Amino acid sequence: MTLQDDLVELRRALHREPEIGLDLPRTQERVLAALDGLPLEITTGERLTSVTAVLRGARPGPAVLLRADMDALPVHEKTDVPYRSRVDGRMHACGHDLHTAMLVGAARLLSSRRSDLEGDVVLMFQPGEEGEEGAKLMIEEGVLDAAGDRPVAAYGMHVFSTTIPRGLFLTKGGPVLAAADTLTVTVRGRGGHGSAPHRALDPIPAACEIVTALQTHVTRTYDVFDPVVVTVGSFHAGTTDNVIPDEARFEVTVRTFSAATRDRVREGLVRLARGIGEAHGLTVDCAFGIGYPVTVNDDAEAEFAARTVREALGEDRYFPLPTPATGSEDFSYVLEQVPGAFLVVGACPPGRDLATAPSNHSAEAEFDDAILGDGAALLAELAIRRLARTAA
């Protein structure tokens, strides 16, 4: 079997048995089996089922880190692929099974070219990317010090099931993905009969007013070139048509692209919600949950990654990422401490319309295995060339 065949087999095995969160015992077991026999120094996590593997180069030098996330999502798969999930309510709907297989492939390629390595490579297999801060936990458990010295660079990539042509790699310097925080607003009033709202303090109209005011606040307060995205994804109030409830509650995802705007929007949204509640004689409780920070590529490392794609895979395989994406990533924690680059790659299956293909996180999302070999090769090339550059 070729490396590509092996990676397809591994990816599909992972896809059939998805695991979510920080505890991925079966996934960890498959990764360890796939790495067995390679000249790696392997450690596993204590608070999460991570795998850290260090490949020592033939000659001394610095370290480079390569990362893949391994967790799936609580999504019930609706595709008809022959390797569809066997676990109800769980699916690799974001393509992390491909990321894991590609990093295993990079480990094999790098091991076969150990004599070319002028330093060490840290392979970071991470659980809990989907909201569990797995990268942060791995950093706390020492992944950045696994080779001895801190890495001089770190690289990761993410597949897209839509929008981007298959096999095309994109990145840019500066922000590439948003910070993702959560605002929970509870508007407290006084319940009563629906026929006599004047005898109650109705929280629902005020909560609705806050929801619409959030959008106006964003468009009239923040620079369009340093954008803010707010979306109310959950709204709950009441039990029936003729009862005014005591409270209304909604949850908001807040996406920002700079630390300064992130701090500013946190204060601004809370002030707005409380002010509207006060105007209606209501009490408003706001809880701001801090999520993943902005994913920021180092300018030089992003240019290096772009050049590596063009030279290793072809000029037509790279396109500059025109704008940051509004998704978020906990690889951002790594890039806060190590200069590096995060790339995205198109993995839409052939025959699908890029404009209408189901997106990542959809129960119908599909990804093309054909990119596994190139993804593995690119990760390996990034490590080899980056170590060589430092040595030179």
Image (cartoon, helix red, strand yellow):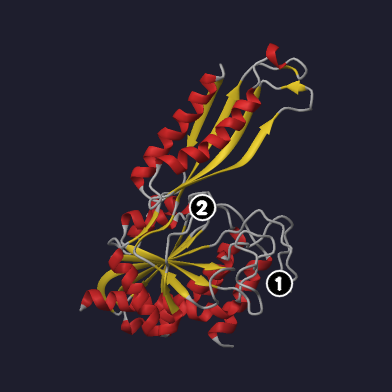
The three-letter amino acid code for the residue at tag 1 is Tyr
Asked if labels 2 and 1 touch by Cβ distance under 8 angstroms, the answer is no
The image's mark for residue 235 is: none
Q: Residue shown at 58%/38% (left/top)?
A: 251
The three-letter amino acid code for the residue at tag 2 is Leu
The image's mark for residue 83 is: 1
State which quarter of the image contains the N terminus: bottom right
Is 209 positioned to the left or the right of 47 in the image?
right
C-alpha distance separating marks 1 and 2: 26 Å
Residue 182 screen position, x and y as percent: 51, 40
Instruction: Give the labeled residue for mark 2.
Output: 48
Is 176 positioned to the left or the right of 214 in the image?
left
The residue mark sitting in front, 1 or 2, is 1
Q: Residue shown at 48%/24% (left/top)?
A: 275
Which is more toward the observer, 69 or 225? 225
Which is more toward the observer, 288 or 41? 288
Residue 374 screen position, x and y as percent: 49, 80
Which is more toward the observer, 23 or 265? 265
